[in-house]
Image: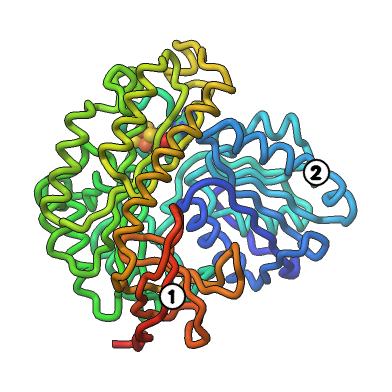
Amino acid sequence: MTVMQPTTTPPGRVLMEVFGCQMNVVDAELVLGRFRKLAYEETQDYDAADVIVFNTCSVRGHAEDRVISRLGALRDWKKAKANRVLAVMGCMAQREARDIRRRLPHVDLITGTKDFPKLAELAQRVRAGEGPFVVIDGTERPDVERLPTTRPKPFQAYVTIMRGCNRPCTYCIVPTVRGREISRPVDEVVDEVKALVDEGVVEVCLLGQTVNAYDGQLPGQVTLGTLLRRLDAIAGLKRLRFITSHPTDFNDDTFAAMAECSRLDRFLHMPIQSGSDRMLRAMRRGYTVDKYRAIVDRVRAAIPDMQVGCDWIVGFPGETEADHEASLAVCEEMRFSQSFVFKYSPRPGTVSAESMVDDVDNETKKRRNNELLDVQARVSLTSHQQLVGRELDVLFEGRSRLDDTKWAGRDPAHRIVCVEDERIREGAFARVRIDRCSALTLFGSVVAVHDASR
Ligand code: 5AD
Ligand code: SF4
């Protein structure tokens, strides 16, 4: 399946649907880039599409259920016109290729998490009458070639700097579907970011499942800090951030670099998952609440205005009311700037799904989810109120989703800031005075619009 034959099928239109995390957004971009190289056009119109690609997620059952039902609904689309291709890539393709083919035989192309660079060419071949193809042999280096680019916003880019995860978290499917950690070399990432900046990108977000374990393929010599320093020196790059960090993967050099790099966002996403040591042990997270707290203290000592955002899982097997109360207390105490809360979802093949009982009922999970969000909303509101009257630098991303008379952007701490001002446009930088706030949003007035170039 490695040798590609050129085909004479004319190029067509491709529609991409992305589920799951930012890494999937980037992978979708890489695949669309390859379709574009084959002279395909992108479309949002199902009727006009010759190829539909689903980039899928396996992290929770709900994400998979949605994909299955959406794929099922495309049976008629597939039948309505000859030579249409329905393709599935991403984590769920990797995990369930056989099952997808059996349950949904109208899916005619499946590529695993390391094979999607071949997807565009294979889609061409399916259109020419070959296939179906299922390729999950994991032989490609997906990040080598990014161009031509298909970024959704011209001024922002995600850059995958490492793939895979070596950690043993008992609930998580990611290590199974994405494999062992592999970092990209420093120079390769630096060259990619330089090329993006030359194209007009001002904000770069580095991606990895455990991004602070980055080693540039030179463990002991290279850290995430090495890369941050190199990127911080690129003229024209205004904002730099990285997601997602694991609390135990930091090292002194990375902390030092974070304090040195002036373009680094003041926002660190570092999931805690639970505020109960008993649960953290059962999850095999590799730290206690005290250890997590010590890391946050260190970050805040080095970079006083650094905001910390986090993920939580509620209703992990065996989680009692006391464990949950501990999470509420930790959420209050740590003063996180954001919390993403997930209801535990047993993933087939993981340690928790195979050897623990999913004994917290859905109603209780829902209630615990809401209670954590309520605590977070109170914490956020209090910290937002302290910003009223202050001025923040904001990069505007587009119209507000809730009110299209307003522009929405983010400050360096990744907080959402909305203004109404006709000088603003997508990609504009401005200094904004905060007038009022809610738990989720800051509202302000533009003090000055900055020149985007420097
Ligand atoms: N059930 C619920 N949430 C999960 N996450 C990962 N695996 C599961 C699971 N099986 C959450 C974690 C992680 C985020 C990306 O998804 O909080 O940080
Ligand atoms: Fe999953 Fe844990 Fe790795 Fe995150 S660190 S991807 S939760 S195994």
Give the image quarter of residue 294.
top left
Q: Which quadrant of the rendered structure holds the C terminus?
A: bottom left
User: Residue placed at 39% from the left, 44% from the top?
Assistant: 378
Q: Nearer the viewer, residue 92 or 154?
A: 154
* 89 left or right, relative to 426: right
Give the image quarter of residue 176.
top left
Amino acid carrying label 2: it is Ala
Q: Secondary structure at mark 1?
A: loop
Amino acid carrying label 1: it is Phe
The residue where tag 1 is placed is 155
* Disc sitting over residue 73 in the figure: 2
Label 1 lies in ligand 1 vicinity (Cβ under 8 Å) = no
* Disc sitting over residue 108 in the figure: none
Q: Is residue 441 visible?
A: yes
Q: Where in the figure is residue 390, as x and y percent of width and height?
A: 29, 70
Spatial separation of the CA atoms under disc 2 and disc 1: 35 Å
Q: Is residue 178 visible?
A: no
User: Quick check: 23 above or below 166?
Assistant: below
